[in-house]
Image (cartoon, helix red, strand yellow):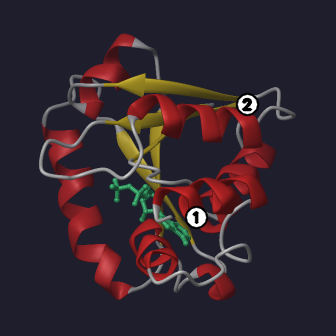
Amino acid sequence: MKVLYPGSFDPVTNGHLDIILRAAKRFEEVVVCVAVNNSKNYLFSMDERIEMLEKVLYDYDNVKVVQHEGLIIDYVEENSIDAILRGIRAISDYESELQFAQMNKFYSKTNVETIFMVAEPEMSYLSSSIVKEIASHKKDVSRLVPDFVAKKIENKYL
Ligand code: ADP
């Protein structure tokens, strides 16, 4: 089964990595899709977000990183994706994830399914936004993201 894990990854966190690596053990292929969401302002450019993901996922042969500018469902249908994978941290994620899953199904010619994996409890407080917030106050985030990502964020807030 080939699953698509879409997100902003601005930047990738240990929470995203936990989901990706657990999925890589269970599915034949995991396609990590860096998406453009017009309602978001990003700290990192598309190229930077891709580069960080590629670096950290280099050793995993069944994980690939792609970028996509349109609707996720279009990528799914054009690239023979079997299911969309999303992570759920808390009940607060549920509402928006449900909407995303329903809309993808609604617009899918193949009735695409969304598979949810729950965050490990110690990752459930972790989001790209909170990492950026902490780093912007010059606090160390190296326990929340890979080391080289921590350095990149620190440089943004110099
Ligand atoms: P988006 O902008 O689409 O929410 P994100 O990069 O924030 O993209 O997240 C991508 C996916 O990863 C979402 O399904 C999100 O719920 C999930 N996710 C984010 N952080 C974590 C975490 N700490 N543990 C598990 N899943 C997570």
- Number of numbered discs overlaid on the protein picture: 2
- Circle 1 is placed at which residue position? 154
Locate residue 127, reporting x and y percent.
47, 72
Residue at position x 73%, y 31% in the image: 28
Q: Which mark is residue 28?
A: 2
Q: Amino acid at mark 1?
A: Glu
Can residue 111 be seen here? The reply is yes
Tell me: 20 left or right of 157: right
Q: Residues within 10 Å of mark 2 (few under 14, many from 20)?
A: few
Q: Can you tell which quarter of the image residue 109 is in?
A: top left
Q: Is 60 above or below relative to 94?
A: above
Residue at position x 58%, y 64% in the image: 154
Ligand 1's image quarter is bottom left
Q: Amino acid at mark 2?
A: Glu
Q: Is 93 above or below relative to 108?
A: below
Tell me: 90 left or right of 64: left
Locate residue 119, reporting x and y percent.
59, 75
* In this view, the mark in front (1 or 2): 1
Ranked by sequence position, the earlier of labels 1 and 2 is 2
Tell me: 77 left or right of 54: left
Q: Nearer the viewer, residue 151 or 54?
A: 151
